[in-house]
């Protein structure tokens, strides 16, 4: 099973829902991560789809930034060497932007992409 989030005003309700959900999933022969599937205050932030979601904002997980920077650097080198097309490089950047724009990431996008120098394509 992939990501799922349930919200309630009290822990007891969440624990009851968790038990019912685990029973239902067991009938489908599915399991959940026992360390991750537990009620917690939303103020702690909820890891969800590559973000940590808080009541008033969303932050991209740091490992997602590191991963993109590494991949982007490799793609820039491949483009400069002529083994990657501009369309493929553009798709990499647009795909990342389209994902991270759902968080509070304007400054991050400027920091990661603002100084990027696209080298001339290799021959």
Image (cartoon, grey):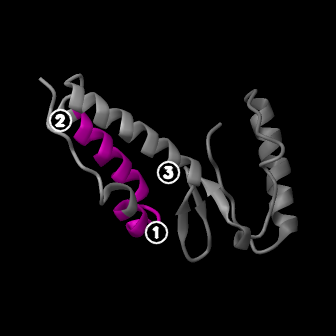
Judge whether 30 appears above or below 115 on screen.
above
Residue lying at 83% horizontally and 43% vertically, measured from the top left: 34
Residue placed under numbered mark 3 in the picture: 65
Displayed quadrant of residue 119: top left
The kind of secondary structure the magenta stretch mainly shows is helix
* Residue 53 image point, x, y percent: 60, 64
Q: Give the number of the mark in front: 2 or 1.
A: 2
Cα gap from disc 1 to disc 3, whole angstroms: 13 Å
Mark 2 residue crowding within 10 angstroms, few (<14) / some (14–19) / many (20+): some
In the rendered image, which residue does mark 2 sit on? 86
Q: Position of residue 122 (x, y in %)?
A: 16, 27
- Tag 2 and tag 1, C-beta contact below 8 Å: no
Above or below for 90 versus 101 = above
- Provide residue 65's location: percent of width, then percent of height: 49, 51
Residue matched to label 1: 104
Tell how many labels: 3
> Which image quarter holds the N terminus?
top right
Tell me the residue at 82%/48% (across/down): 20
């Amino acid at each position: 099973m992939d990501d799922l989030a349930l919200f309630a005003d009290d822990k007891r309700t969440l624990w009851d829902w968790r038990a019912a959900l685990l029973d239902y999933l067991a009938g489908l022969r599915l399991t959940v991560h026992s360390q991750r599937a537990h009620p917690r205050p939303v103020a702690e932030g909820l890891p969800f789809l590559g973000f940590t979601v808080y009541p008033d904002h969303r932050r991209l997980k740091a490992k997602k930034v590191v991963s993109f920077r590494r991949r982007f650097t490799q793609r820039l080198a491949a483009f400069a060497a002529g083994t990657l097309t501009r369309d493929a490089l553009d798709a990499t950047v647009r795909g990342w932007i389209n994902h991270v724009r759902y968080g509070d990431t304007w400054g991050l996008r400027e920091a990661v992409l603002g100084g990027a120098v696209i080298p001339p394509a290799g021959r």
